[in-house]
Image (tube, rainbow, N blue to C red):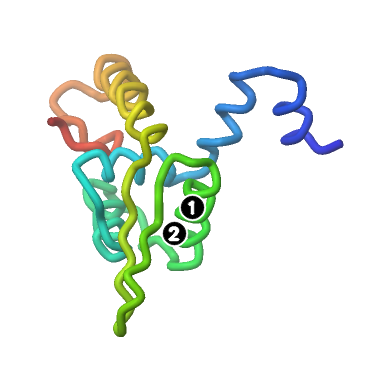
Amino acid sequence: MTKAKSALTCGCPVAAFQKMISGKYKLRIVWDLKDGPRRYGEIRTGLLRGSDGSSEIAPRVLSRELKALTESGLIDRRDYGLVPPKVEYRLTRKGKSFVPVIAAIRDWGTRHLTPAGSGERAIGMAAE
């Protein structure tokens, strides 16, 4: 049995939560979608905003993260069936309920991880 399956079957909500949000970009994607639906390019641009010294996100990586978030039920993918393709991503009800958790993480990071005077860019999520 894999570690992922054992975390989910053992009934440990912390391990299941950790598995669901693992990855470099998932929290930031959900955070960016809190303001409404976004298209792929808008999500990609949002991930690059406020990331000092980070390289561009590979399209394959972003697609994988979006697919995982869709499978976990945090976001919904809407394909308009147009040419050129138009696809939007939006938070589901479950995803919207997760935003306050991310806000709490952001607030904790601001208090404990951000050097004085550097603002919130150090954690990659702009203030409201």
Marks 1/2: CA distance?
5 Å
**Residue drawn 40% across the image and 50% down it:** 76
Question: Within the image, what quadrant is residue 88 found in?
Answer: bottom left
Q: Name the quadrant of the N terminus.
A: top right
Q: Tell me residue 4's x, y (percent).
A: 72, 35
Q: Secondary structure at mark 1?
A: helix
Which quadrant would residue 3 be assigned to in this image? Answer: top right
- 33 vs 61: above or below: above
Residue at the image position 45 percent from the left and 54 percent from the top: 66
Q: What's the residue type where badge 2 is placed?
A: Leu
Residue 50 versus residue 81 in the image, above or below: above
Identify the residue shown where x is 76% and y is 20%.
Answer: 10
- Nearest the eye: 114 or 57: 57
Q: Nearer the viewer, residue 120 or 67?
A: 67
| Quarter that holds the C terminus | top left
Are discs 1 and 2 less than 8 Å apart at CB? yes
Q: Nearer the viewer, residue 74 or 81?
A: 81
Residue sticking out furthest to the right? 1
* Tag shown at residue 62: 2
Q: Residue 82 appears at what percent x and percent y?
A: 31, 79
Q: Which residue is mark 1?
A: 65
Secondary structure beneath dot 2 equals helix
| Relative side of 41 to 65, left or right | left
Tell me the amino acid under the disc marked 1: Glu
86 sits left or right of 22 in the view: left
Q: What residue lies at 35% left-to-right and 54% top-to-bottom? A: 54
Q: Is residue 125 above or below residue 64?
A: above
Q: Residues within 10 Å of mark 1 (few under 14, many from 20)?
A: some
On the image, the x and y values in percent for residue 119 come to 16, 30
Q: Nearer the viewer, residue 75 or 51?
A: 75
Residue that sits furthest to the front in the current view: 81
Dot 2 surroundings within 10 Å: few (below 14), some, or many (20 or more)?
some
